[in-house]
Structure formats: structure tokens, C-alpha cells
Image (cartoon, helix red, strand yellow):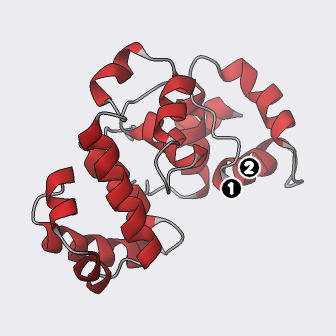
Amino acid sequence: MLAAIIRAHPRVTMVRRGEPFFTLARSIVGQQISVQAAATVWGRFESAVNVVVPENVLAVSPGALQAAGLSRRKVEYIHDLARHFLSGEVRPKAWSGMDDESVIEQLTTVRGIGRWTAEMFLMFNLLRPDVLPLDDVGLQKAVALHYFRGRRVTARTIQRLAAKWAPWRSVATWYLWRSLDPVPVEY
């Protein structure tokens, strides 16, 4: 099944998504809004902070970030992210020597970053090859469609099925997403 999906999507690959702070900030901005709305708010956010780095984000008032389209909660999240980077609580230089779960544990100390966001970061920023985002709705839909005739399945069932994809579960997930939507989403 997976081989057929891969053959149906030639010449498309996963690509790295920018610097860690930039990528995580963009993930927070895009949470729980449409892709189009996220792009609009992100453009306004970038204009407000000029260069998306922790120092610039903290230098802009919460009110100015809200005027750019961020909710009060997202402003809190972005500020918390910036403080974690500046304080060294989040250590991007250490990630290459850390396993996936340790990176997830570190990232989820930031308000507004949950396991799913951390998994997307592992896949699209660190290009970790064996991440299986069991809570991802797209993965659940694709597995149900291609392997279970559209019937919903449990995370445990997906995990068992995906065991044979290791150590390339990120790649398998990415192709399963492509089977639902051939245009990759930018995280």
C-alpha cells in the first residue's frame, strides 16, 4: 500500500523549515486557525517584529502583537517561547545529541507547545526520520482510508501497523498525508 502511495507522488520530498525559533513561533501562530488565516497573521507578525528572533519578539509590546492578529493567549505563548530560548531552557545546539523523546520533553516545557507541535518540529525542522505522530488527524484518516476501508482505528492499531515502517515512520507519515492532499502544508 505504502509503496503505491510513494510511486504516486514522485519528486516531492520533506524539506527543513527554517531556524528553530522561527519554526516554533510560526507553529504557535498557526494553531487552531486556517492555513490562509495563519499566513495573514504570520505576515503581520513578521512586520511587527522585523526579524523573528527572541529579542525582537520580547521587544514588541503585547498590544502590538495583538494588533497584528495574535490572540492574547498566543502572545503569551510566543513570549514564553522567546524567554525559553534566551534563558537556555530550550537548547537547540543540544538537540542533535538528544533522542526524540528528550527533545519533545524539552519543547513541551514551553506554554503553547504540545506533543503534536513538538513532533511536527522533529519531522520538519530536525528532519528526524522515525517520528510517528499518533494524534495527527491526517495520519489517522489516511491509515483508515488505505488500510481499513475507511473505518476509524485506534492509536494502538496505527502503532502496530507502523512498526514495519520503522526507522522511516516520518517519511511514511508524510507520504500518507500526500495521499490525502498532494500539496504539503508549511509548518
For the residues labelled 2 and 1, the Cα–Cα distance comes to 5 Å
Q: Secondary structure at mark 1?
A: helix
Image position of 91 with respect to 42: above or below: above
Q: Residue at x 65, y 54 (%)?
A: 138
Residue 26 in view in this figure: no
Q: Residue at x 35, y 60 (%)?
A: 78
Residue 102 lies, in percent from the top left, at 52, 24
Task: Determine crowd level at label 2: few under 14, some 14-19, many 20+ residues with C-alpha closer than 10 A.
Answer: many
Q: Which mark is residue 137?
A: 1
Quadrant in the picture for residue 172 = top right
Residue of label 2: 140
Disc 1 marks which amino acid?
Val
Foreground residue among 130 and 144: 130
Tell me if label 2 and label 1 are in contact, CB under 8 Å: yes
Residue 62 lies, in percent from the top left, at 28, 75
Task: Determine crowd level at label 1: few under 14, some 14-19, many 20+ residues with C-alpha closer than 10 A.
Answer: few
Q: Residue furthest top?
A: 97
Residue 142 lies, in percent from the top left, at 70, 49
Disc 2 marks which amino acid?
Gln
Q: Quadrant of the N terminus?
A: top right
Apparent side of residue 171 relative to residue 143 in the rendered image (left or right): left
Apparent side of residue 1 relative to residue 147 in the rendered image (left or right): left
Image position of 29 with respect to 184: above or below: below
Q: Residue at x 18, y 70 (%)?
A: 60
Residue 151 lies, in percent from the top left, at 89, 53
